[in-house]
């Protein structure tokens, strides 16, 4: 499986994630299909 960093414009509040999002350690943060409901969730995934 290929992994890459998210760019800031790739996700937005209210969007449905088309893929899983992992942290640097490989832990799942947000699952495919998750709806980003707040700016906190977005910033946590991108930073």
Image: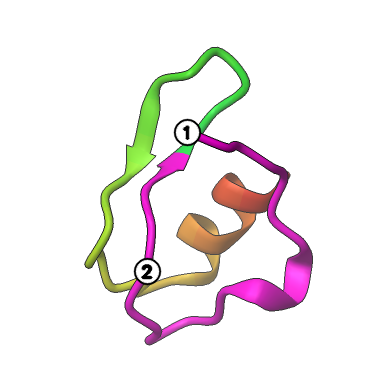
Query: Magenta residues, as a range?
Result: 1-21
Provide the major secondary structure of the magenta segment: loop
- Left or right: residue 18 versus residue 24 is left
The residue mark sitting in front, 1 or 2, is 1
Residue appearing at x 22%, y 67% in the figure: 33
Residue 35 x %, y %:
28, 73
- Which label is found at residue 44? none
Residue appearing at x 77%, y 62% in the figure: 7
Q: How crowded is the residue under tag 2: few (<14 C-alpha within 10 Å), some, or many (20+)?
A: some
Q: Where, by quadrant of the figure, is residue 18 drawn? A: bottom left
Residue 36 x %, y %:
37, 71
- In the structure shown, which secondary structural element does the residue marked by tag 2 occupy? loop
- Left or right: residue 7 versus residue 20 is right
Residue found at the very far bottom of the displayed protein = 14
Residue corresponding to mark 1: 1
4 vs 26: above or below: below
Residue appearing at x 55%, y 62% in the figure: 42
- For marks 1 and 2, the one nearer the N-term is 1
Q: How crowded is the residue under tag 1: few (<14 C-alpha within 10 Å), some, or many (20+)?
A: few
- In the structure shown, which secondary structural element does the residue marked by tag 1 occupy? loop
| Viewer-proximal residue among 3 and 35 | 3
Residue corresponding to mark 2: 17
- Left or right: residue 17 versus residue 7 is left
């Amino acid at each position: 499986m290929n992994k890459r960093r998210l760019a800031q414009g790739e996700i937005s509040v209210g969007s449905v994630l088309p893929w899983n999002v992992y942290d640097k350690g490989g832990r799942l943060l947000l699952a495919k299909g998750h709806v980003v409901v707040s700016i906190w969730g977005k910033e946590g995934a991108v930073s």
